[in-house]
Amino acid sequence: MYDQLMHFRHAALLKLAIAVSCLCSLEVHAQAEVYRCGNTYSQEPCKGGRQVDTSPPVASIGGSGSPSTQTVYLCRNKAGGGFFWTRQHCHEANAWVERTETVPRNMSWEDQLAMARAQRDAAVALTSPQPRTYTQQNTQPQVVNNKAACSMLDQRVKDLDSMGRAGSRHYDLDWIRAQRKNARDEQFRLKC
């Protein structure tokens, strides 16, 4: 048992050493110079080739995406529950973050604020349920050929009765019972 445990430890250490050496070699290759030679790239200089910058791009300070944008925060005051917009993170004002919006950095504060509010309103409109519109229905009784509707409902009741008989392969008898009741109620409403 002890030998198996030691073998496992040595295997794990060996795997760790291999992983570290791979990472080190990747770091050396990432820092190696790269040259563009016509339509190909090489790590060795070539005639007429030029060196290519392979350094990673610098992210903007503040993490808002690009240097031309800025994050503004909608904060909720911990004490009073009021809301306010700010360029600094909400925790600096002893508040909770309610929402963040990304706006162009070169705008005035009022324009940034207007844009952030518009973005927030658009997002709220997408997530809120659409209001239902109600129309006034005609209260006059409609003269319709109820004979066809009554015969369709009668056939529906017969079909549901056959589904609910003993030996049927339909197992949801509560659903069948509810559908039959709905059909009979509609027949009564139509005065069949």
Image (cartoon, helix red, strand yellow):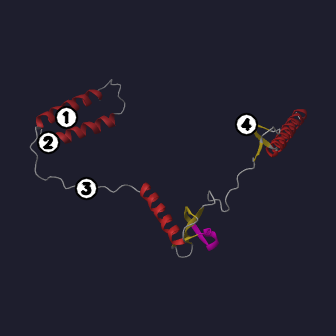
Q: Residue visible at 73% across and 50% down?
A: 56
Label 3 environment density (alpha carbons within 10 Å; few <14, some 14–19, many ≥20) = few
Q: Nearer the viewer, mark 3 or mark 1?
A: 3
Q: Which of pointers 3 and 1 lies earlier in the amino acid sequence?
A: 3
Q: Is residue 33 above or below residue 152?
A: below
- Marks 2, 3: nearer the viewer: 3
Give the residue number, with chain letter if any, for mark 4. 38
Q: Quadrant of the N terminus?
A: top right
* Residue 106 horizontal/vertical position (percent): 57, 66
Of residues 39 and 190, the one nearer the viewer is 39
Q: Residues within 10 Å of mark 4 (few under 14, many from 20)?
A: few
Q: CA distance from mark 4 to mark 2?
A: 84 Å
**Circle 1 SS class:** helix
Question: Label 1 sits on what residue type?
Answer: Leu
Measured in 3D between alpha carbons, the distance from the residue under mark 2 to the one under mark 3, in whole angstroms, is 24 Å
Q: Are marks 2 and 1 in contact (CB under 8 Å)?
A: yes
At label 2, the amino acid type is Leu
Q: Quadrant of residue 121?
A: bottom left
Mark sitting earlier along the chain (1/4): 4
Going from N to C along the chain, the mark reached first, 2 or 3, is 3
For label 3, the residue is 134
Residue 190 marker: 2
Q: Is residue 84 visible?
A: no
130 and 70: which one is in front?
70
Magenta span of residues? 87-96
Q: Amino acid at mark 3?
A: Tyr
Q: Residue at x 56, y 63 (%)?
A: 104
